[in-house]
Amino acid sequence: MTGATRVGALPQVPTLLESGVTDYEVYEWNPVLAPAGTPADIVAKMSDAIAQTLRSPDVTKHIEELGGRVDAMSPEQAKTFITAEMQRWEGVIKAAKIQLD
């Protein structure tokens, strides 16, 4: 498991940290994005509806059964998170000299 904590669906599987790999935390993330220029009130309405759906007990349970975690972010939080992830992986790509073939 690459996250900071064990996954409820696989509680017997230790995290990488528990296995001795330090400074490593990676998550799969699946944002819902809107086109640039979408009015803020529409973005807010969509964000609220998606967050409400993700927090419903049935949806949360299903996602957790699949080994996922619900982390419904506000548009501002998502922007901050995505920006940080892009910077993080850009550094990894440059350090490893990864290129497309």
Image: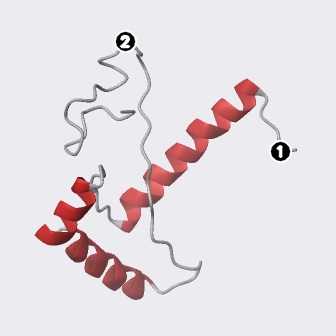
Q: Say which residue appears at 47% left-offset and 59% top-offset.
A: 79
Q: Decide which of 63, 89 is in the foreground and name it.
A: 63
In the rendered structure, the answer to whether residue 86 lies left or right of residue 98 reads left
Q: Position of residue 40 (x, y in %)?
A: 42, 82
- In the rendered structure, which amino acid carries the disc numbered 1? Leu
How many numbered tags mark residues here?
A: 2
Q: Position of residue 96 (x, y in %)?
A: 73, 25
Q: Which badge, 1 or 2, comes first in the chain's sequence?
A: 2
Q: Say which residue appears at 66% left-offset and 39% top-offset.
A: 90
Residue 98 in view: yes
Callout 1–callout 2 Cβ contact below 8 Å: no
Q: Position of residue 97 (x, y in %)?
A: 79, 29
Task: Please tell me whether mark 2 sits on a helix, a strand or a loop.
Answer: loop
Numbered mark located on residue 82 in the image: none
- Quickly name the residue at label 2: 20
Dividing the picture into quadrants, the one containing residue 47 is bottom left
- Quickly name the residue at label 1: 100
